[in-house]
Image: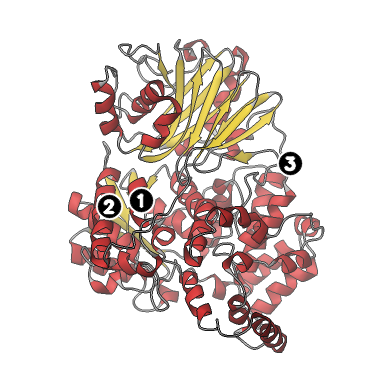
Amino acid sequence: MCGICGFTGATEQDGAILASMCDIMEHRGPDGEGRYLDDGIALGHRRLSLIDLEGGNQPMVRATAERSARVTSPALRADGSPCADEASMKAKGDLAIVFNGEIYNYRDLREELEADGWEFSTHSDTEVLLVSYLAWGEDMLERLRGMFAFAIWDRRTRELFCARDFFGIKPFYYTEAGGRFIFASEIKSILEHPAYERELNEEALAQYLCFQFSALDETFFKGVFKLPQGHCMRVKADGALEMRRWWRPEYRFDGERSEADTVEAIDRAMRESVRYHNVADVEVGSFLSSGIDSSYMAACLAKENPAIKTFTVGFAEYEGERDEITWARELADELHIANTSKHIGEDEYWASLPRVQWHMDEPSADPSAVALYFVDQIAATQVKAVLSGEGADEFFGGYRIYQAPFSNRKLAWCPKPVLRGASKLMRALGVRGANYLERASQTAEDWYYTNANGVAFSPAERAAILKSVPDVPSPQSLCAPSYAEVAELDEVTRMQYVDLQFWLVGDILLKTDKMSMAHSLESRVPFLDREVFRVSATIPTEQKVSDTQTKLTLRQAAERAIPRDWAQKEKLGFPVPVVGWLRQERYYQQIKDCFTSEEAARFFNVDSIVKLLNEHREGAKDNTRKIWIVYMFLVWYRIYFVDRTVPAKPAAR
């Protein structure tokens, strides 16, 4: 895990720019810095060392494409210290790579390559990745098992090859400015390059209001894009970009397999994935919450390493007597594993918001991102890598919204126009149930565009609060191409697929990466494994979700490792008590000051957003998520476009 950056069109005078791009990402890799500068290319790397601690430094350079040739020293001094002068940054070779992530099957790939005559100088997965490219070209992507974003420079053809993993676990941003292709693991690194002039992308703001995260390939910074998950890109010598999709999720349901055999397949795949994700030359810990995902995962890791350390955060004073931490401690005792926990106080939660938004690069309105910030913080004091449970909901049907199609079927007998008319009447009268009737009259394509549904702004609400509404497509229109790719599948699976393309990569995985890297901690996600997905993609919907329960077969698999109370526990998400906080005078006034600021007036109808705040305070409506969406944007905007300074780290408590 680390940070990568670079740009084409480099000259020997660009060393200071490359250094600045690396320095701003020091939190991603405090263990070392490497820089490669040659005519036409600059590559930078910040290293968090977990595999081959001595030999895995980057950028890594291959001297020749011959199989018997060895890899040269990375672009560092002989003693392993970072380069300081431009001359020492040059290491001659045909190929140079910078890589962020982990290749969990690198030992298997190395054995295959060695059997074919290739030799190695290190024990790192980075070298295996580079030699795999030499041996198999772009086809090597299909062989990888892991999380990755990397760039490989070919000195002979003067081309740059870039790729991002299956699900978008690792970020990759890029732009074209001043005739240069500039890329990095974080946007703040790109901002250090003088060729790019920062400009707000107001279309991204409009979509953010409906999604609560940055939903477009183009980021909040005009002209800065994300390389989509499962895509690769070749930057040609003439500056042309050639992008292609090298992988997409495909479903092939096994209707003949029994439920018991499905449970066995899930358990086998998860245990194997956890074993692969435990590969490191440092200790690997695990998060542990009250939910099934982290509980099952931690129990599987405990089988590999009984001395594992687990980490939990919660808000006990709001959650009740048996809070998140109590559940985790009880399971840790049951499994005989260590657990470190922390109750997050409201003062430190609020004090952390500017720093969190700075690390996120783009505004994120997910309140649990801050909780992740703190659990990563405590984990980083004891380990350098942790397992985290992201992906289980999207793979195995964990969100309660996936039960909506089952509920809708109960009204299949009723004509659609009648349902729509009844919905409008109930909404006009303020009677609950209007949304249910409206959805029952529609298909998923009509209303579902990720978990932001119902909590973020609708297109009509967006138009009401924005001072100037850009001509942008509806959220449903953005999701339509993804729905079209799986049009032949059932409604629940279509919803899962859309969440893989938008919600998982845009919200869940982004906060996972940015919050862990804020503390120089690697977050590994065993559910988001190629083989685990292969199993999940064969499970018929009736073995995943019913009208009364989610994750049907995953829960049964988890019961092989954890007690039934944890395996069958209802999904709550991560409970953050923002609802109550926003009704306290101190936070109400803090946000009102922000909503009536000069920055707010530039983008929003101030009366409209203050009305949201007042309605919430008075208890007339729960506007928590809408308030938070606007507030987080304004906090982020002040950091990146007004103050343009790095917020101080909140004091540790």
| Residue 152 image point, x, y percent | 48, 24
Horizontal side of 571 relative to 85 (left or right) equals left
Above or below: residue 651 compared with residue 66 = below
Rendered residue at 71%/25% (across/down): 178
Amino acid on which the number 3 mark rests in the picture: Glu
Using the image, tell me which numbered label, if any, was put on residue 199.
3
Labels 2 and 3 touching (C-beta < 8 A): no
Classify 596 as above or below 11: below
Q: Which structural element holds mark 2?
A: helix
**Residue 513 in picture, x, y percent from top left:** 46, 47
Left/right of residue 628 with respect to residue 393 in the rendered view: right
In the picture of the structure, the residue carrying the numbered disc 1 is: 534
Residue at the spot 45% in from the left edge and 17% down from the top edge: 95
Q: Position of residue 112 (x, y in %)?
A: 26, 27
**Which amino acid does the dot numbered 2 rest on?**
Ala
**Contact check, label 2 and label 1, Cβ < 8 Å:** yes
Q: Where does the N terminus fall, quadrant-wise?
A: top left
Label 3 crowding class (10 Å Cα cut-off): few <14, some 14-19, many 20+? few
Residue drawn at (55%, 81%) of the image: 412
On residue 269, the disc is 2
* Secondary structure at numbered mark 1: helix
Q: Amino acid at mark 1?
A: Arg
